[in-house]
Image: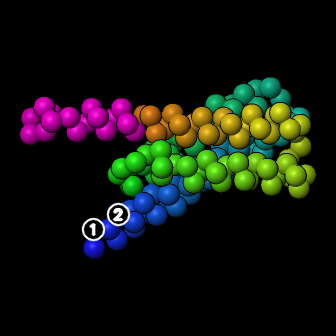
Amino acid sequence: MANSWVKAARSAAGIVIGYLVFVAGAWFVQEAVLGGVGYHDSLNTIALAGVLTPVAAAAGAIVTVSIAGRHPWLHIMPMFILIGVETTYLYTQGRVDGPLWFEVAAGASLIAGGVIGALIWQVLSKRLWRPETVGS
């Protein structure tokens, strides 16, 4: 019974902390580094945001699955759902200045970053914890 609670706590902590890492990283890139990003910004600003913000999503996914410790795809799905909900909300409420295709692409790039982060975690976890490397 206690083991189930530990797994549930790790799952919840991984999801929450990973999402916070993602949000903080996205804020840092878009607001602190780039001074705010919008559809009408320069191509350089949009390109930098398009590369660096998915890196924040990847970092959040890596944190999520590292803490959860198992079932990486299950644990990053809430992050993907929140990205979709937030993108929809911001667009429908007029809080973003880009056309629909631009905002959907931005949300999709965040999901892609999360997928890449989960894949990185899977590759690293297999390399770091292979039986032949334990005790070497």
Q: Nearer the viewer, residue 14 or 47?
A: 14
> Residue 128, how many percent across, how many down?
25, 36
Per the rendered image, the range of residues in magenta is 121-136
Identify the residue shown where x is 48% and y is 49%: 74
Q: What residue type is labelled 1?
A: Asn
In the orientation shown, which residue stands out farthest toward the front?
1
For the N terminus, the image quarter is: bottom left
Mark 1 sits on what residue?
Answer: 3
Q: Inspect this view and state whether residue 16 appears.
A: yes
Q: How crowded is mark 2: few (under 14 residues within 10 Å), some or many (20 or more)?
A: some
Identify the residue shown where x is 89% and y is 37%: 99
Instruction: Find out whether the residues at labels 2 and 1 contact each other: C-beta distance under 8 Å.
Output: yes
Q: In this view, does 68 lie above or below 54?
A: below
> Residue 44, how many percent across, how many down?
76, 26
Q: What element carries label 2?
A: helix
Q: Which of 64 and 30 is in front in this view?
A: 64
Q: How crowded is mark 1: few (under 14 residues within 10 Å), some or many (20 or more)?
A: few
Q: What element carries label 1?
A: helix
Identify the residue shown where x is 57% and y is 36%: 113
Disc 2 from disc 1: Cα separation: 6 Å
Q: In which quarter of the image is residue 38?
A: top right
Q: In this view, does 40 lie above or below 27?
A: above
Q: Which of 3 and 108 is in front in this view?
A: 3
Q: Which amino acid does label 2 sit on?
A: Lys
Q: In which quarter of the image is residue 111?
A: top right
Identify the residue shown where x is 75% and y is 34%: 105
How many dots with numbers?
A: 2
